[in-house]
Structure formats: structure tokens, C-alpha cells
Amino acid sequence: MHLRLLHRLDDAERTLREALATSPEDPDLLAELAWVLYLAERPAEGLPAAEAAIALAPGQAHFHQYRAALLSDLKRHHDAVQAAFTARSLRPDDPKIARTCARVLVRAGRKHEAYEAARQAVALEPESAFSHLLVADAADELRDRVTARRAYEEALRLDPQNAMARHDLAVLDINTGHLARGLRGLVEAGELDPTMPIVLRTVTHVVWKLSWRLRMLFIPATIACVVASGAQPDEPTWSARTAAGFSLLAIGLLAWWTVRGLPAGVRPAVLAALRADGPLRVTYLGIAACLLLFLAVAVTGFGLFAGLVWLVLGLLGVLALVVGAVRRLRAR
């Protein structure tokens, strides 16, 4: 147990297996092995240990709790919910079991029940940051953003070093349109726990979202340049120069308005996201190419360059759709 608390999971597993070699039917050892394997993200191996422990001692509530968590990781949501309910019926006043119920119900898509289970966990242990975090997550699933924000802030008041609460509040900020505040929160979450990979994934998601915003700005600008160039885009015109100049100015101002409040610490996170995601790098190179094409129209007056922007935007759109489809398939 001490090794598990130190997150030395390999050593904890080895110690448990040595103990089980001499006491193979000790339910406490089996249950502890199940929990260690759950923490090691090996639910398929942990589930048999939990079920063996339950067979030996069916009245132990936390054995059913471990089984519920393992089944949830295996996406056997119906069985996970039933196991969580069994644990709760055996020990209804245990806040840890109430929290497991809430997590299992959220993953099973039973949002209202998850919210009530999380509130029960807070009632049982009001000073637990984790319980408030579960309330926040469940409320966010129900689109109750006011309750979610209040619960995230309470979790951080109780545990200012809780990186997951800081991350989730940042995501809430981003989803409610507070981009700068959200990115600042992501940076703070990364500083609290540099090993948390979800921070980089979320930053990458935000940078993708920004790329969509920038591309949307190019559409009216491109239309304005093409219309201004008239029927002969291969001949220079002052109207095309003027349209391109105003387009560049408008794009620059809107881009500045979007990123004006970003903290300095965001830059390394954005660069890390670009290094880690090849299609994202290509997307921003394409955006840079579009800006150069607008600049070419502004300098030369040839509307033909604006027409090439359509080609670049089309290719970037296809790339984004392909990447999205591939990543959705991988997530299944």
C-alpha cells in the first residue's frame, strides 16, 4: 500500500504477487492487486483479481468499488454501474464510494444520476476537493456552466495545487468564449503538473480552433479581392490592391483582438503543440501562405493571387476533415 501511494506501481505489483504466492486466497491482497492494476491502466488484468476477491468476501464494499472502476475503464458501463450501486448499498455513507459512483455514472452517460451522486459525495465529505471536482464535471456535462464554475473554484480553494481542477476550469473558460483566460489556466495546470498529457492535448485542440477562426476570416476577404479584381484577375487593378490592403488590415486587427490577452507563458505551450502535431503545422503554414497571397495582391494588384487562396483554403479544409475522421476512429 505504501508503494502504491508513492506511485511505485511496478514494485507494488511485484510485492503483491510475492505475497499471493504464499496466500493465493487472501481477498485483501487480491483486491489491492486489482487496485494497483487499475492505477497502472491495466483493467483487463485487474478485473479477474477484483472478482476473485469478491468471490471470497462478497460483503466488502470497496471490493465492488474496485470492480466498478475496472469495468468502467473496460467500457462495460452497465456492469460498472451495477457494481457501483452494490458498493453503495453496502456502505452508503462512504464518500469514496459515492465518488466512484459519480465517475462511473458520468462515463455511462447517466448525467443526472452522476450529478446527484457527486452532490452526495460533497455532502459526505464537504472538504474534499475531488468531490467538488466531480460536481463540476457532472454539472458541465449537464451544461450548467454556473454551477460547474462555482464547483471548480471551490475545488481549487480547497486544493490550490489540483492540476486537473485548474485544467478543467480552463476548458470551461475556453468553451464559454474566454480564450485568453482559458489558455492562461492551461499554462498554470501544466506548471502544477508537467507530466499531465491532457494539457498538451487541450492546447493543441485550442490551436486547431484558432486555425478555424483565422480561415473563416479569409473567406470574406477573398471574396472582396476577387470581386474587386473584376472580370480580368490577371491584370493589375487599384481596386484589388485596395481590397487586399483593407483585408490584411481587418485580418490583422481581428487576429490581434483574439490573442491580445494571451499570457507570455502560452507561447512555449503553443510551440510544443505545433511540434507534436504535424497536420497542425501544415495548417498554419497554409495560413501563412494565404497571408502572403493577400500581400501579393496588395503589392501587385493581380486578383489572380486571391483566387489561389481558395485553393489553399480548400486543401486545408480537406486536411482538417481527414485528420478529424482519423482521430475519431482511433478514439473508438
Image (cartoon, rainbow, N blue to C red):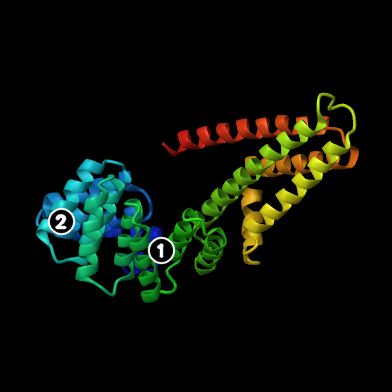
| Between 10 and 188, the one nearer to me in the picture | 188
The vertical placement of 63 against 222, above or below, is: below
Q: What's under tag 2, amino acid-wise? A: Ala
Residue depicted at x 76% and y 51%: 249
Mark 1 neighbour class, 10 Å CA radius: few under 14, some 14 to 19, many 20 or more: some
Q: State whether residue 257 appears in this view.
A: yes
**Residue 185 vertical placement versus 302 (above, below):** below
Q: Is residue 139 left or right of residue 30?
A: right
x and y percentages locating residue 179 in the rendered image: 55, 58
Q: Quadrant of the C terminus?
A: top left
Classify the position of the N terminus by image quarter.
bottom left
Q: Work out whether residue 322 or residue 2 is closer to the camera in this orientation and state it.
A: 322
Give the spatial CA distance, label 2 vs label 1. 27 Å
Depth-wise, is mark 2 or mark 1 nearer the camera?
2
Percent across and percent down for residue 268 are: 65, 60
Q: Is residue 30 visible?
A: no
Observer-nearest of 166 and 299: 299
In the picture, the disc for residue 8 is 1
Q: How many marks?
A: 2
Q: Secondary structure at mark 2?
A: helix
The residue that appears at 24% across and 51% down in the rendered structure is 112
Instruction: Measuring from the top left, give residue 218's x and y in whole percent.
Output: 69, 40
Residue 87's tag is 2
Q: Is residue 184 left or right of residue 26?
A: right
**Residue visible at 20% across and 43% down in the picture:** 79
Q: Residue at x 50, y 69 (%)?
A: 192
- Residue 36, x across and y down, in percent: 32, 57
Secondary element under disc 1, as helix, strand or loop, is loop
